[in-house]
Amino acid sequence: MRRWITRCVAVLGLLLVCNAHALTAEEALGIAVGETDARIEALGKAAAQGDDRTAAYLQALADDAVKLAAGRVLVVRDGKGLDPVSGEGVPVPPDAEDVMLNNRLRGEIDTALAALRLFSSDVSLRRQAALSLLKDPDVSRKPVLDKALAAEKDAAVLDLLRQAQAAVMLGSEQAAARMSAARTLGQSAQAEVLLLLNQQLSAETDPAVQSALKAAVRQVQDGLRWGERLGQLFTGVSLGSILLLVALGLAITYGLMGVINMAHGELMMIGAYATYVVQAAFRQYLPEAFDLYLLAALPLAFATSALVGALMERGVLRHLYGRPLETLLATWGISLILMQAVRSLFGAQNVGVENPSWMSGSIPLMSNLQLPWNRVLIIAFAAAVLLGMVLLIGKTRLGLFVRGVTQNRPMAACMGINTARIDTYAFALGSGIAGLAGCALSQIGNVGPDLGQSYIVDAFMVVVLGGVGQLAGTVYAALGLGLAGKLLEGWTGAVLAKIAVLVFIIVFIQKRPQGIFALKGREA
């Protein structure tokens, strides 16, 4: 009975409407020390104020970031102290002790935080608070939900509040209330609601309520299924854009020049490590401009990989044109040398490359569908690189020379074109694009000496499937393989999906060895 009374005191404190003052030192201390019932009562009084200082202090308590020293409380984050009342920085004494919270207090703090956010002026905070109450329904929060429903104007938040109220009513003793709650929750498209309905269904004994719960489960599943399908499509397009970035450089070195470059993956790795070096330099020398490091890393990744590619072509490959087996063995040996050089410089362990703040987070489209910003931007980046490459090959003097040397080397030489220099430029261009791919890949995974090995086979499959020398075929093949792989994963699993894609490519090449887009007429 006593516990119920203290819980009601906390909830009623949240519902008080008064001209309350800001958080005081006595209230902050009362929440942090003393008996549990007294601390909950102090929590209710402080939370009734609804000011930002109180919310920040309660969040710090929930994060275990509050310490007690000399009869006062301090918020300590990253070793720096902060007075929760004034917001000013204060030194942290060496004898400061952690504030202890039991499960009951943590639950009350979570309730207070959610309630404070429900009445925030920020719509996004109110939406998050309503969603958190929906995920963790508690009958003691019903008065808070009722008041929030009466005051809310935003349609999306209102919908979440009704669902949170219905989730609370799922535990009602009245069958009619549980049936009504099931019908309300059936209109939701939240994955958490599906879990709540299944939990209630396993414990429900009333046949009529069971029927309503089953109908609600089916309705929620139908709503979530579209999010899953769209998520698979986005993942497939994302993978396809990565394969496209990886294969674009190979489309030049292999598709246009006929060089089987087994070191293409290592050129990507060099671009990724160049990004890592730029990140480290910005973190040390320009920490205030850290979010701009990726813009500086892009040209450096391109230039570094292009330079290594040019040295490869001038030092080794120009002596091996027309000898594919020797070229394959030579580039494989170069790939081993490059991997060992990176291990010697940076170590054998993976290194982490951090996303800039503008690439962090995601775009929420549905309850079970969020598009990560880093993958969205990589898709846009792949499209931009593709457009730039098409314009370069089709509209510039260098592109004209590359196409001329590729189609008829003797005739191009007779027209005064320095074919050896064009070979170097083309190989450097393909290598530089591989460096850009490595820079992009560093934003979605760890960077290590074996980075390129994970993509080289897929890149060759894309180029061969699309048609040697055909950029349009490379695009279709990359997106097709990405979508097919991800869609098959949902049915067969990752391993069998990979095998199925490989078998398809083998059969396709048997029937159409020239690829999706074959060279015709004089181009052939």
Image (cartoon, grey):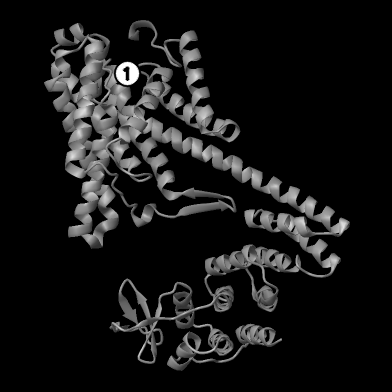
Q: Position of residue 41 (x, y in %)?
A: 58, 89
- The residue drawn where x is 20% and y is 32% is 338
Q: Can residue 276 be seen in this view?
A: yes
The one nearer the camera, 500 or 406, is: 500
Position of residue 520 in the picture relative to residue 429 (left or right): right
For the N terminus, the image quarter is bottom right
The one nearer the camera, 275 or 407, is: 275
Neighbour tally class for label 1: few under 14, some 14-19, many 20 plus, Cα within 10 Å? many
Give the image quarter of residue 478.
Answer: top left
| Residue carrying label 1 | 255
Q: In this view, does 507 lie above or below 143?
A: above
Identity of the amino acid at label 1? Gly
Q: Where is residue 75 in the image (x, y as percent from the top left)?
A: 38, 79
Position of residue 241 in the picture relative to residue 286 (left or right): right
Q: In this view, does 91 lie above or below 222?
A: below
Position of residue 288 in the picture relative to residue 225 (left or right): left
Give the image quarter of residue 468.
Answer: top left
Q: Where is residue 23 in the image (x, y as percent from the top left)?
A: 47, 88
Q: Position of residue 117 (x, y in %)?
A: 55, 74
For the C terminus, the image quarter is top left
- The residue drawn where x is 29% and y is 22% is 252
